[in-house]
Image (cartoon, grey):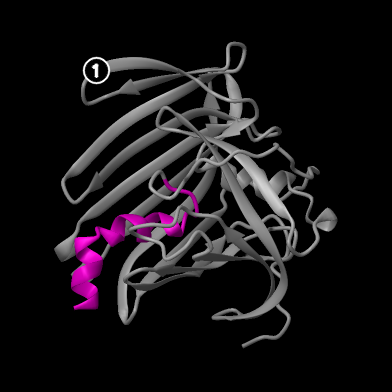
Amino acid sequence: MLFHNFIQLKGFKYLIFISLFFSSSLLYSESYSDTLYTKNYNAFKSGEFFEYKLYYGIFNASYASLELKEETLENKQVFRASAIGRTTGLARLFFKVEDLYETYFDKNLVKPLKSIRNIYEGGYVKNTETTYDYDSNKALLYNKLTDEEKEFKFDENIQDIVSTFYYLRKHLDISKLKTGDYIYVNIFFDSENYPFKMKFLGIENLKTKFGIIECMKLNPYMEAGRVFRNNKGLELWVTNDDNRVPIKVKANLRVGTIVADLTTFRGLTNPFKIVIND
């Protein structure tokens, strides 16, 4: 019955992008002052790859991956980040998901230049491309299915849902954070601006398939309602090293708990620190 209820809520849509940590269905707006301690870390490079398995109870329901490559965009060397999510096995039988989110971003500033969204979620299809003009602070969204273009105004210092992941890894200065502090980012997604915040919960040793890993624990704030029990229902563990790898996500939903675990990684820039080998 629990699994059936999860299907009825289209929970797999949420499950896929919990592992990517930022989703159109999870973002919400709240007023705040834009504050972020910044530094410039060498946290990633071309060739980096992560894969996550996502579990709903006893079910291995889907997987998601993140890959980073160097590309040329308008005669400029940039990074292209590709985020892929798919349901598998029994989950795919009930609710097929094939999602691709890609972002081309500036290598130094980690500023999104072009965003691609090509998704299939249980019959719902969307295929869009967004380009950003920072002189006018306007985004041009092209719908490939309808061959339509629309222009939208975006806020200062925006990220998209994929570039946010890399921006925080490269620029967030954790050394200045205290337990209980908040991290804020402006996210532009699908024609709208979303102020996003996370709470820093401190340092915690986490048992993983790789061994005991020292992690930063974070609480991304999500909209409470039909899917999440409350706006603190999502927990995120990120390695407390120079790579800042998201290693585990736990989501407490109204219809159960989802866990996303890192299963594979390669191409890290810095040593992967293990406190105790498993």
Seen from the viewer's position, the closer of residues 237 and 41 is 237
**111, above or below 54, in the image:** above
Q: Quadrant of the N terminus?
A: bottom left
Secondary element at tag 1: loop
Residue 141, position as x, y percentages in the image: 39, 21
Q: Is residue 3 left or right of residue 35?
A: left
Q: In this view, does 94 lie to the left or right of 182?
A: left
Quarter-of-image position of residue 10: bottom left
Q: In which quarter of the image is the C terminus?
A: bottom right
Residue range in magenta is 1-23
| Residue position for label 1 | 147
Q: Does the magenta stretch include residue 17?
A: yes
Residue at the location (58% across, 48% down)?
165
How many labels were placed on the picture? Answer: 1
Residue 146, position as x, y percentages in the image: 21, 21
Quarter-of-image position of residue 33: top right
Residue 91, position as x, y percentages in the image: 22, 67
Which SS type dominates the magenta stretch? helix
Q: In this view, does 240 lie to the left or right of 56?
A: right
Q: In this view, does 227 lie to the left or right of 94?
A: right
Q: Is residue 149 magenta?
A: no
Quarter-of-image position of residue 179: bottom right
Residue at the location (38% across, 57% down)?
225
Residue at the location (51% across, 40% down)?
29
